[in-house]
Amino acid sequence: MHVFITGGTGTIGSAVVAELLGNGHTVLALARSDGSARALEGAGAEVLRGDLADLGALRSGAARCDGVISLAFGRDYSSSDALARAIAEEGDALATLGRELIGSDRPIVTVSGTPWVPGRASTEADPLPTDGPVGGRGRSVNALLDLTSQGVRSAAVRMPRTVHHQGRGGFAGLLVDAARRTGVAGYPGDGAQRWPAVHALDAAVLFRLVLESAPAGTAWHAVADEGDAVRDIATVIGRRLGLPVETVPEETFGPFGPIFAMDQPASSAHTRDALGWQPTHPGLLEDLENVQP
């Protein structure tokens, strides 16, 4: 399969590109900079220059390929407004890619987050939230999944709060960044809230499986660790960086603060049973041992 991918140089995307190429697929990857283009070409992908806001490039990439994996998302999370702009940009991109595939029965796989359900681990059957700080992402993904009635084999891989590789990435990576910036390995609340996690290389396998075989209109959970306590995550970070571990105000983490404070474990039992996906790489707490002072 010739696959068009956006976000192919990120923590998840670089792993997905390698997974696809290592399993007989070819890749056309969107690149917004010379550095990204060099990295993608070095990995063995063909490059299409453009960014997520270049809707013409997105249409061209989708038209040239047998399937699409959409992973790109803005990098500015410094304020609620910046996060809202990134969500709106992603929504426009997904709508553009989806329209290009209407009537073709070609697959498109997008990324979203695992939902949170009070009192239990969320499952693949739970709906995505469509309100709150990231509710716009849920609405965009739902609109893409609705295109199944128009001949698009759309599917969503829901990612946990942390996708990690060599101690970097996801919410845990933001905790590391905040610790370096403030001198405290901090966590909101009492730290008992749980975050699910997955290694990027395990997540990449799931993206391939969903692209190859998932039924239209389905959602899947890329969850290896059902829920690591945030206090435990901060404790490893503090030890690795030689910093005190303390509770800190939610505001320390900007627009993500209210999300960081939530207990949000997630299950992947259905995904494992239905697709035969089995994570094999280190869990989050083990992988955080790679954080360097």
Image (cartoon, helix red, strand yellow):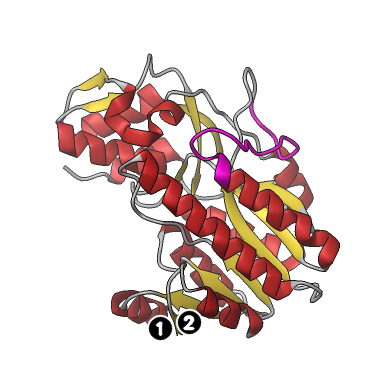
Task: Specify start and end residues of the magenta stretch as a single range.
Answer: 121-136
Q: Is residue 103 left or right of residue 279?
A: right
Q: Which residue is mark 2?
A: 45
User: Does the image show residue 235?
Assistant: no
Image position of 263 with respect to 277: above or below: above
Image position of 132 with respect to 151: above or below: above
SS under mark 2: loop
* Residue 106 in picture, x, y percent from top left: 75, 73
Q: Nearer the viewer, residue 142 or 117?
A: 142
Q: Nearer the viewer, residue 49 or 143?
A: 143
Disc 1 residue type (three-letter): Glu
Residue at figure coordinates x 57%, y 47% from the top left = 137
Q: Which residue is mark 1?
A: 41
Magenta region includes residue 79:
no
Disc 2 residue type (three-letter): Ala
Judged from this view, the residue extending furthest toward the top is 190
Residue at figure coordinates x 71%, y 46% from the top left = 271
Q: Quadrant of the N terminus?
A: bottom right
Q: Residues within 10 Å of mark 2 (few under 14, many from 20)?
A: many
Mark 2 and mark 1 in contact (Cβ < 8 Å)? yes
